[in-house]
Amino acid sequence: MEQEPQFKYIVRIANTDVDGNRKVADAIRKIRGIGFSMARAICGTARIDANKKAGNLLPEEVVKMDAAISGVARNLPKWMLNRRKDLEDGTDKHVIGTALTIAQEGDIRLMKQIRSYKGVRHSMGAPVRGQRTRSNFRRNKGKVVGVVKKKDAAPPAKEEKKEKK
């Protein structure tokens, strides 16, 4: 008789703790670098039911999920990957977790170093992707700045009155 596996409230997949109460596809979306489409594709590659609770996964299935996540670049089309034609080695890969954070920081540092438009905007703390700045992004170190009006030209007006006399 087959014994039902012990339910786990926290499952460790790809060096990340995921919630065992959620469906597998939803749970692995908590891993940085895995979105909705990638989660569904990983479940399909590992041949695991995406609607199954993550806490009910067997240890063998967890190992299959880890292998599917690490082998995403080989098993899925190139357009689904998040790091195509990497600047360092020119390969197509999918980066997840802390490696994604490090790669993003390196890209921003390179843009600042070569003084590209996006790099200059990053260094100024301004919006990078062309958003309007008239009413939004008015923050300075966490505090709202608001609209700063120009001073009226009052002193020159007083001088004109003296000339008329």
Image (cartoon, grey):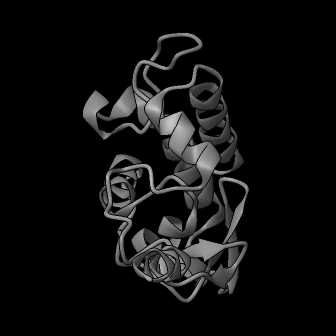
Quarter of the image that includes the N terminus: bottom right
Residue 9 vs residue 97, the one in the foreground? 97
Position in image of residue 137 (x %, y %): 48, 71
Say which residue appears at 66% left-offset and 47% top-offset.
101
Image position of 151 (left or right of 109): left
Say which residue appears at 63% left-offset and 81% top-offset.
5
Residue 153 vs residue 16, the one in the foreground? 153
100 w.r.t. 23: above or below: above
144 w.r.t. 57: above or below: below
Image-quadrant location for residue 105: top right
Total marks drawn? 0
Quarter of the image that includes the C terminus: bottom left
Residue 4 vs residue 30, the one in the foreground? 30
Position in image of residue 17 (x %, y %): 70, 70
Say which residue appears at 55% left-offset and 59% top-offset.
61
Image position of 148 (left or right of 100): left
Query: Which residue is outermost to the front?
Result: 165
11 w.r.t. 127: above or below: below
* Residue 108 in view here: yes
Position in image of residue 162 (x %, y %): 50, 80
Say which residue appears at 59% left-offset and 13% top-offset.
88
Position in image of residue 47 (x %, y %): 36, 54
* Residue 53 in view here: no
